Image (spheres, rainbow, N blue to C red):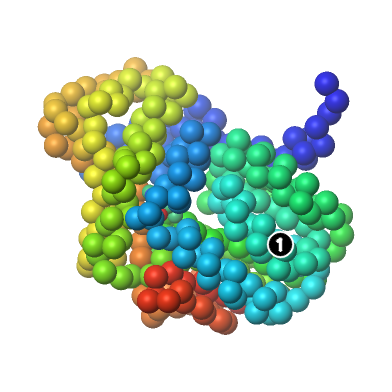
């Protein structure tokens, strides 16, 4: 076969079996038990997430897309020409397409995505649509970034794109350290465009994580199927149920897998007993207020240079600068 230039350039820094096993053993030994949400995103998990974004209850993606369409010309004017774009958690690249189009003469694009299938598929499609942009994909957990590949042409500035309220999947201290890492990655002239879900009526938020079609439940349970396949654990998928609740004082969705009955799960030769109704934490989805988000940015040495909100404050975009 002819060499594939895209695959040759791809920086592959995916967590392997040993790292996943270590994370899972640590999570199962903690109280309450927890599994890292980054392991949702295998090929099937990324496909299920795309399906979530099309559910009527999941307002986040369509609201952010509509807001982006509206404000991208203004963002492009603030960013200026010949930018390098780095995106965290790029997924299908649906929002990227709009951003690259609006910016016009982007020098290089570096998507950082933990799902290799999602990364390869999206970069292939983007490379066809934007042949002049150098594609420098990185398959990695963006909280443990390898050095980013250098581009052939010099860029005037770096724009870090972090849409989707993926920041909300991290507890506050971890979110601040991601923002700090972004400030370092983008440099003194850099900008960061971040999508955040805004705090609102709890029923609307809770419905988004409990769609009637059950896609979110399938997405959550797929985590167990993935671990069984990749690290040889023996989670019984019919022994756990998806639960997502909005905890108002913490302004976050807390998603768990709840054990239906007493059971034992084996991972790497170790046995873990679950009680009936025991909840294993799998994901946070934080929702933000303006003052709170600005304070987090400030703690990372960043300030909010511009802010745009969707109607009824359903979702927000923030442009951060050092
Ligand atoms: C990727 N992330 C921002 C999604 C969210 O809304 O927290 C993941 C998700 N989990 C359940 N539904 C969607």
Q: Depth check: 78 or 94 in front?
A: 94
Q: Residue at the spot x=60%, y=53% of the render?
A: 94
User: x, y (%) of residue 48?
Assistant: 45, 40
Q: Residues within 10 Å of mark 1 (few under 14, many from 20)?
A: many
In the picture provided, is 3 more to the left or to the right than 315? right
Q: Residue at the spot x=18%, y=24% of the render?
A: 263
Residue 84 lies, with reference to residue 71, above or below; the image says above
On-image quarter of the N terminus: top right
User: x, y (%) of residue 84?
Assistant: 75, 63
Q: Depth check: 252 or 140 in front?
A: 252
In the picture provided, is 289 more to the left or to the right than 68? left
Q: Residue at the spot x=71%, y=45% of the render?
A: 125
In the picture provided, is 244 more to the left or to the right than 82? left
User: x, y (%) of residue 254?
Assistant: 28, 52
Q: Considering the numbered disc 1 on the image, is that residue within a helix, a strand or a loop?
A: helix
User: x, y (%) of residue 179?
Assistant: 52, 65
Q: Depth check: 109 or 269 in front?
A: 109
Q: Residue at the spot x=77%, y=67% of the render?
A: 104
Residue 206 lies, with reference to residue 235, above or below; the image says below
Q: How many labels does the image show?
A: 1
Q: Can residue 185 be seen in this view?
A: no
Residue 27 lies, with reference to residue 75, above or below; the image says above
Judging by the rendered image, the residue that carries numbered circle 1 is 100
Q: Is residue 22 visible?
A: yes
């Amino acid at each position: 076969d002819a060499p594939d230039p895209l695959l040759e350039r791809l920086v592959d820094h995916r967590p392997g079996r040993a790292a996943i096993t270590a994370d899972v053993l640590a999570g199962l030994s903690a109280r309450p038990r927890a599994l890292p949400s980054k392991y949702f995103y295998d090929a099937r998990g990324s496909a299920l997430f795309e399906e979530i974004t099309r559910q009527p209850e999941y307002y986040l993606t369509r609201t952010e897309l509509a807001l982006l369409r509206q404000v991208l010309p203004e963002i492009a004017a603030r960013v200026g020409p010949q930018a390098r774009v780095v995106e965290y958690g790029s997924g299908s690249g649906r929002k990227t397409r709009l951003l690259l189009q609006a910016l016009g003469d982007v020098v290089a694009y570096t998507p950082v995505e933990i799902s290799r299938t999602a990364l390869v598929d999206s970069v292939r499609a983007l490379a066809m649509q934007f042949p002049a942009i150098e594609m420098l994909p990185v398959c990695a957990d963006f909280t443990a970034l390898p050095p980013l590949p250098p581009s052939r042409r010099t860029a005037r500035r770096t724009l870090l794109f972090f849409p989707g309220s993926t920041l909300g999947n991290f507890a506050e201290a971890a979110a601040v350290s991601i923002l700090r890492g972004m400030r370092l990655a983008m440099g003194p002239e850099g900008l960061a465009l971040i999508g955040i879900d805004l705090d609102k009526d709890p029923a609307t938020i809770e419905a988004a994580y409990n769609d009637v079609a059950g896609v979110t439940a399938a997405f959550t349970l797929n985590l167990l199927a993935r671990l069984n396949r990749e690290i040889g654990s023996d989670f019984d998928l019919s022994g756990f149920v998806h639960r997502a609740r909005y905890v108002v004082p913490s302004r976050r969705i807390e998603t768990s897998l709840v054990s239906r009955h007493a059971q034992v799960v084996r991972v790497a030769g170790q046995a873990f007993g679950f009680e009936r109704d025991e909840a294993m934490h799998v994901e946070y989805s934080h929702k933000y207020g303006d003052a709170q988000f600005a304070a987090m940015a400030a703690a990372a040495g960043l300030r909010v240079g511009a802010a745009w909100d969707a109607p009824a404050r359903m979702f927000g975009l923030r442009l951060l600068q050092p």
